[in-house]
Every structure is written in C-alpha cells, then in structure tokens.
Image (spheres, helix red, strand yellow):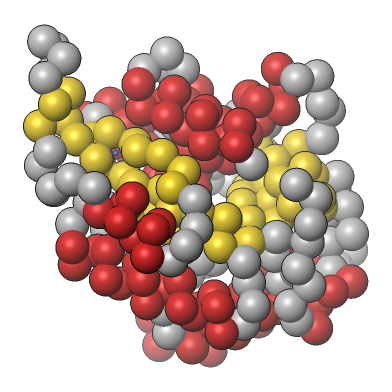
Amino acid sequence: GDARTVTGPAQQALPGVKHIIAVASGKGGVGKSTFAVNLACALDRVLTESGRKRRVGLMDCDIYGPSTPLMMGVSRQPEIQGEMLIPVENFNVRVMSMGLLVDEHTPVVWRGPMIMKTIQQFAANVEWGELDFLIVDLPPGTGDAQLSLVQTLPLRGAIIVTTPQAAAVNVARRGAMMFGKVNVPLIGVAENMSYLEGADGARQYIFGQGGGRRTAQALETDFLGEVPLDPLLREGSDLGIPIVISDPQRPASQAFMKIAERL
Ligand code: ADP
C-alpha cells in the first residue's frame, strides 16, 4: 500500500522517497544486515522486472558495526557536492553507511553521540534522489537510540528479523513493542536461518522451528517468510556480492524475492 505514517519532526525529509522501511532485530547476529542488503537488491530486481525506473536506497544506521559496505562491495568514500553526500551505488542500489565515512579505528565512545546526528544527516544531507524504497538497517536492539532514531524518519513501517530460537523471539517481541510506542506500524516478521536443506531436500531445523510465525501471531502482524541457512549466503556477503545478485535461483534468493514482492 501507499499509506505512510509520519512519526517525527523530519516529516519534510526525503520527499523523493516513496517508502521508507526499517529493518530491526532484538539482538545482533540474527542476520539483520544480511537481510537488509538482500532485500534491497531483491526490491531492485522486482522493480526492474516491473519496468519501474526509480531506485532503491540502503541506509546503514548500524554505526557500531557497519557491515553493509562490505556486503554490498562498496568501499570508496562518498563524493560531496555542496552540503550533500552522494550515496555510493552498486548493483543499482544507493548505499550510505557510517562505514564509508569513518575507518574502523574510530573509537566507539565517539560513536554513541554520533548516532542521532548521523541519522539526521543521512536523511537530510544525502542526495538519495528519487527512490521507490529506502531500506534502513537499524542498530541491533531495542534501546533509546533505536527509539529516537525511528522517530526522526517518516517510516512506512518496520520489519522485524528473527531466528527461530525462543531467545531471539523474545527480543524480537520487545523490539516490536518499541515500534508500538512511537506508532510505527509493523509490516511483518521475517525469519532468518530457518533451516538447512541438504542435497536430498531434507531440512534440518538447526535453531528450532516456528519462532518467526509465533512472533508474528503474538504481535498480530504478517509473517513475511523464511530465509534458509545457506553457506553461499554468507560467502556472498563476505565477497561483497549479495546472493540475490550472484545466484537469483537459489532458494535463499527466492525467499528474498518473495518478501520483496509483498512490499
Ligand atoms: P546482524 O546484522 O543481525 O548482526 P549479520 O547480517 O551481520 O547479522 O549476519 C551475521 C552472520 O551470519 C554473517 O556472517 C552472515 O553472513 C551470516 N548469515 C546471516 N544470515 C545467514 C543465512 N541465512 N545463512 C548463512 N549465513 C547467514
């Protein structure tokens, strides 16, 4: 749909962007960034196939461990035009990340206070251009930083990424409550690392089963789908070529495409 919820002072921000969607998780390590990167690439494929010309953007707000540049294969510093930063583009996706602006030696104590400023600048001082979707990769967790962050962006809604594990499910629930507090609608819950499929097609449920669906039910939101465990998914991330790009027929890629088609 086209419904947009304006939640904060930045209502005028990003007039050229149709849908701003946050990707969140209760805790780190569930594959939130992997999900955000592949979803962005999948959205571009869906849009390209349907003949639309606008782009997809990816705003990496995970300033403590910005892994998006590595996963998207971008490393060069963004160009500056006047007061505006030009996103770095790869695979048709426009990327902005703290990882492109500071090196890994920047002390972490500087980063905390930088969060809000960074997000505001990523919204106001980045030349995103005309986008159909801007995917916002939030820092993991459900604290104040995430809360104030989502309030500054006119979000259409948030996707919660979880693994099937109960622990991840509980934190995902807390994350969802955080969005409720600031009236950001939930788009749905996506489950990552759902199972590992052998060559014979047999599935192993390494982290248990059904956690994503249960979370979606408990939160009265949609279950968006399951992304399987896949060594090639991790390899693609490490090589800077998302699996959706390198191997679109792979079941994991198909899972991302299906989720993208629902948005
Ligand atoms: P988060 O952003 O939640 O901290 P990441 O996206 O950085 O998590 O993923 C953590 C690690 O797990 C990375 O090495 C990533 O390549 C790997 N990973 C994520 N999802 C999958 C998957 N479905 N199959 C295999 N490896 C995955």
Give residue 126's position: percent from left, percent from top.
Answer: 77, 60
Q: Answer above or below: position of 201 versus 216.
A: above
Q: Answer above or below: position of 5 versus 34.
A: below
Which residue is found at the position 61% from the left and 52% from the top?
Answer: 135
Q: Quadrant of the C terminus?
A: top right
Which residue is found at the position 63% from the left and 24% from the top?
Answer: 45
- Kindly indicate the quadrant of the structure image that contains residue 22: bottom right
Q: In the visual, does 141 lie left or right of 234?
A: right
Front-most of residues 95 and 7: 7
Give residue 172's position: percent from left, percent from top.
Answer: 35, 67
Is residue 215 shown to the viewer in this render? yes
Q: Answer above or below: position of 106 versus 128.
A: below
Front-most of residues 189 and 110: 189
Q: In the visual, does 87 lie left or right of 29?
A: right
Q: Answer above or below: position of 246 versus 22.
A: above
- Kindly indicate the quadrant of the structure image that contains residue 9: bottom right
- Kindly indicate the quadrant of the structure image that contains residue 232: top left
Most extreme residue toward the top, as rendered? Answer: 200
Give residue 166's position: percent from left, percent from top.
Answer: 18, 63
Is residue 65 shown to the viewer in this render? no
Q: In the visual, does 179 lie left or right of 3?
A: left
Which residue is found at the position 17% from the left and 23% from the top?
Answer: 197
Which residue is found at the position 24% from the left and 30% from the top?
Answer: 230
